Amino acid sequence: MRLLPAGVWARVLKRRLPTSLWGRSLLIIVLPVLVMQVAVTWAFFDMHWQTVTARLSDGLAGDIAWASESYADDPTRENLAIIADRAQRSMSLSVDLREGDVLPDERHRGPIGVVDRTLEDALRSRVDRPVWFSTTQYPAYVDIRVQHPEGVLRVIAPRERAVATQAHIFVVWLFIATILLMGVAILFIRNQVRAIERLAEAAEAFGRGETRERFKPHGAREVRAAAKAFLDMRDRIQRHIEQRTALLASVSHDLRTPLTRLRLELALAPPFKRAAAMKGDLDEMEHMIDEYLAFARGEAGEAAQTVSIADLLAVAGEDVRRAGAEVEISVPEDLSASLRPLSIKRALANLAANAAAHGERVRLAARALPSGGIEITVEDDGPGIPDDMHEEAFRPFSRLDESRNQNRKGVGLGLAIARDVARSHGGDITLGRSDLGGLRAAIRLPG
């Protein structure tokens, strides 16, 4: 048989090992304990139990040899009675003669072969006559028979005279001690792993934009230090986000004031040739301010709730129709998910607006994934985006004017905002080629 290389065995073993910290920590405790238990049990049976059994069997064989030789010296009933009485009083042996009987042909062997082999070797070395024995005919006794000319000398001996019968007590106590030690170890490991799991849950929730109360770090000193560092980092990031949002909101407010004055003056001014162009510039500037503020603020503080995906796509479809494109919606009526509605609506609105701006047909679809999540797709029949520029399209303020003339009205934040929303829900957005011939944007969200 050809042996596999060491690298292959390492990969196979790696795939079989637990991947979680709980499983690996448990393996670190359980495996050495099991190895120790097997080693101690083997050493006990090999060095102690077999030695004691061999000595007991040798002693019993010596008593059998004495009874057989004593009877052979004087094969009378009177002598047999004396031998039986002495054997019963001094050796706990029951001796009887079956006149005219012969040894059985069949052998009765017990489940532990070492007992029969040890007793057989002892009897052969100490008894000169043909001998037969059985360790299974009676549960608490050993049946030994010696052939004599007058018949079969039968000796019934207690089992503990031939076998160390209390060995199982040692094994039972060994297992009980092992279980107790493993139980204590499992409790301590579980407590430490739970602290790490709690930290991981808090980090994952913060990554999804969920606001949770501070928790008290517990567990080992290193785990508490990591949890405290995470909480401090989370507070600093939240302060930075709040300051950035407040700054942009203030800038937005300050910019809206002169824009409102310009719009009012433009409305009150007499008609002139450039009025429409100036109004369009004002609209574009206001739209840019809205996009800047939406990108900086996001919807991190919004609470998640169960919403109907069909309703979300219906709202996005109305936006597409208002933009002058033909829309097709395909979604199961009962499909729902726990989402932040405003942020998902903003992401779908951005994707639908991009699709309507660059195509005449737009397809909105949603389906449940086998893994338990959902997938929402927005497709168009426009020019699309080259495969090597998909990641570039997600960069903030990236317009890709040469390939798609993307975000002609905006500042290149539509796809960036949509991906930020998807990732804050624990999912992501991918781009690809649509069956309609244009771009296919797929939002995958966990269940």
Image (cartoon, rainbow, N blue to C red):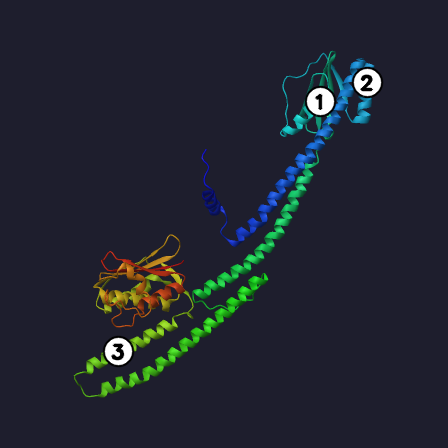
Identify the amino acid type marked 3. Asp
Residue 64 image position (x, y, % from top left): 75, 22
Mark 1–mark 3 Cα distance, whole angstroms, equals: 111 Å
Label 2 environment density (alpha carbons within 10 Å; few <14, some 14–19, many ≥20): some
Residue contact between numbered discs 3 and 2, judged by CB atoms under 8 Å: no
Residue pointed to by mark 3: 283
Residue contact between numbered discs 2 and 1, judged by CB atoms under 8 Å: no
Quadrant (top left/top right/bottom left/bottom right) for the C terminus: bottom left
Res. 81 mark = 2
Compare residues 173 and 94 and report the one nearer the observer.
Answer: 173
Above or below: residue 370 compared with residue 297: above
Mark 3–mark 2 Cα distance, whole angstroms, equals: 126 Å
Mark 2–mark 1 Cα distance, whole angstroms, equals: 23 Å
Q: Left or right: 181 with respect to 328?
A: right
Identify the amino acid type marked 1. Leu
Q: Left or right: 269 with respect to 295?
A: left
Compare residues 31 and 6 and report the one nearer the observer.
Answer: 6
Sequence-first disc among 2 and 1: 2
Residue pointed to by mark 1: 123
Label 3 environment density (alpha carbons within 10 Å; few <14, some 14–19, many ≥20): some
